[in-house]
Amino acid sequence: MTGTCRTKAPALTAAWVAALAIGVTAVISGAVRAETIAVDDQVSVRESNVDRPGRGMTMKRVEAKFGAPQERHPAVGKPAITRWDYPAFTVFFENEDVIHAVVNPGS
């Protein structure tokens, strides 16, 4: 018996399209650097000039550019997630690659 498998594509909502447009604009501009701030259950985004590693950088490149971290936390889970703490930011790695860098409060 042969047949075709059809799946429905998710409907694009106006909010999803707007979020996508904002994301593409931010990526293209390259000048937008922001940090997410959470205080008393309130989340906001503000501009940040803190230089930090970009997504996809390797551990070796991060250490070459920013020096040794103040603290290296052991890897946990699968895939291995590792955290390095610097004075101004914290870096999260999946295996050997940066997945996120967060500006520390007060930086």
Image (tube, rainbow, N blue to C red):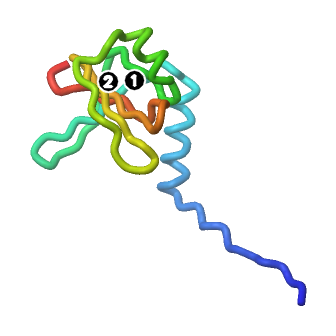
Residue 54 locus on image (x, y percent): 46, 24
Q: Is residue 17 above or below residue 8?
A: above
Q: Amino acid at mark 2?
A: Glu
Find the distance from the CA under tag 1 to the CA under tag 2. Answer: 6 Å
Residue occupying image coordinates x 33% and y 15%? 49
**Front one among 79 and 107:** 79
Q: Is residue 54 above or below residue 93?
A: above
Residue 18 locus on image (x, y percent): 51, 48
Residue occupying image coordinates x 50% and y 24%? 58
Badge 2 local density, few (<14 within 10 Å), some, or many (20+)? few
Residue extending farthest bottom: 1
**Front one among 2 and 75:** 75
Residue extending farthest left: 40
Residue occupying image coordinates x 35% and y 27%? 34
**Front one among 27 and 96:** 96
Q: Are marks 1 and 2 in contact (CB under 8 Å)?
A: yes
Q: Which residue is the site of mark 1?
A: 33
Residue 91 in which image quadrant:
top left
Q: Amino acid at mark 1?
A: Arg
Q: Is residue 14 above or below residue 63?
A: below
Residue extending farthest front: 74
Q: Is residue 82 left or right of residue 95?
A: left
Q: Which residue is the site of mark 2?
A: 47
Q: Is residue 76 left or right of residue 8?
A: left
Residue 32 locus on image (x, y percent): 43, 23
Residue 2 in which image quadrant:
bottom right
Q: Is residue 71 left or right of residue 96?
A: left
